Amino acid sequence: QKEVEQDPGPLSVPEGAIVSLNCTYSNSAFQYFMWYRQYSRKGPELLMYTYSSGNKEDGRFTAQVDKSSKYISLFIRDSQPSDSATYLCAIQRDTDSNYQLIWGAGTKLIIKP
Amino acid sequence: DTEVTQTPKHLVMGMTNKKSLKCEQHMGHRAMYWYKQKAKKPPELMFVYSYEKLSINESVPSRFSPECPNSSLLNLHLHALQPEDSALYLCASSPGTNTGELFFGEGSRLTVL
């Protein structure tokens, strides 16, 4: 079993829709969760960084962690064509080794005008 | 605009060539990273420098040689590469080694003929 599972998609939705992107993980000890966005031919960009359970909101983006289910989500409201990109979840093993990020496969998101 | 600058953006080299990739950041970050990314795959960690010292080498072949001349600069020296080494090479930095907040450059796209 992989430590982090993420559906690679592609996920295609119409402009204005609410998008839900998800990852599952296997180790209940994980506490730090990240979402990165990567446009084609660019480096990843950190979108959201959350600790433990709960929600975190930033504009149209909401990150949610459900530790009981070992499930993390990224919601995008009022999706725009400019949101078309690959979204990667990443999990930090522990606070002493941030370089030990475990990456999901990345979900390719396409927002149709 | 990314605050991590990578040069060159594109590089084509033969298997007998020697070349270098360069990375620069002026955010005062103390940790710097090299990642390799193949198409439709997440980034793979290669090297980590913490306070200018190599702290992680993820079993990378010796034909890749990292160098950290100072806290702002990171180089990756390439020699006798193979066609399968063709990939996007990403540099990243972070404030310290206790956070998963990585700031990536746009990458250097390497093609080995």
Image: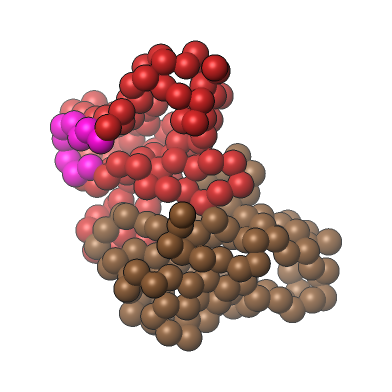
Q: Residue at x 48, y 72 (%)?
A: B24
Where is residue A43 drawn, in percent x and y? 51, 51
Dominant secondary-structure state across the stretch colored magenta: strand
Q: Tell me, yes or no, whether the highlighted magenta stretch contains residue A70.
A: no
- Quadrant location of the C terminus of chain A? top right
Q: From this viewpoint, is residue A12 visible?
A: no
Where is residue A11 drawn, in percent x and y? 51, 21
Residue B79: quadrant of the picture: bottom right
Residue B50: quadrant of the picture: bottom left
Residue B15 or B75: which is nearer the viewer? B75
Q: Going by the picture, which residue comes out furthest to the bottom?
A: B69
In the figure, the shade used to draw chain A is red
How many discs appear? 0
Q: Residue at x 39, y 80 (%)?
A: B71
The stretch in magenta equals A50-58
Residue B20 or B38: which is nearer the viewer? B20
Q: From this viewpoint, is residue A38 visible?
A: yes
Q: Which chain is brown?
A: B
Q: Is residue B110 left or right of residue B59?
A: right
Q: Is residue B8 left or right of residue B13?
A: left
Q: Residue at x 74, y 69 (%)?
A: B81
Is the residue A9 above or below the residue A30 in the image? above
Is the residue A53 above or below the residue B8 in the image? above
Is the residue B7 above or below the residue B77 in the image? above
Q: Residue at x 55, y 18 (%)?
A: A112
Where is residue B53 drawn, in percent x and y? 39, 82
Is the residue A7 above or below the residue B61 in the image? above
- Quadrant location of the N terminus of chain A? top left
Where is residue A49 drawn, in percent x and y? 27, 45
Q: Is residue A91 left or right of residue A79?
A: left
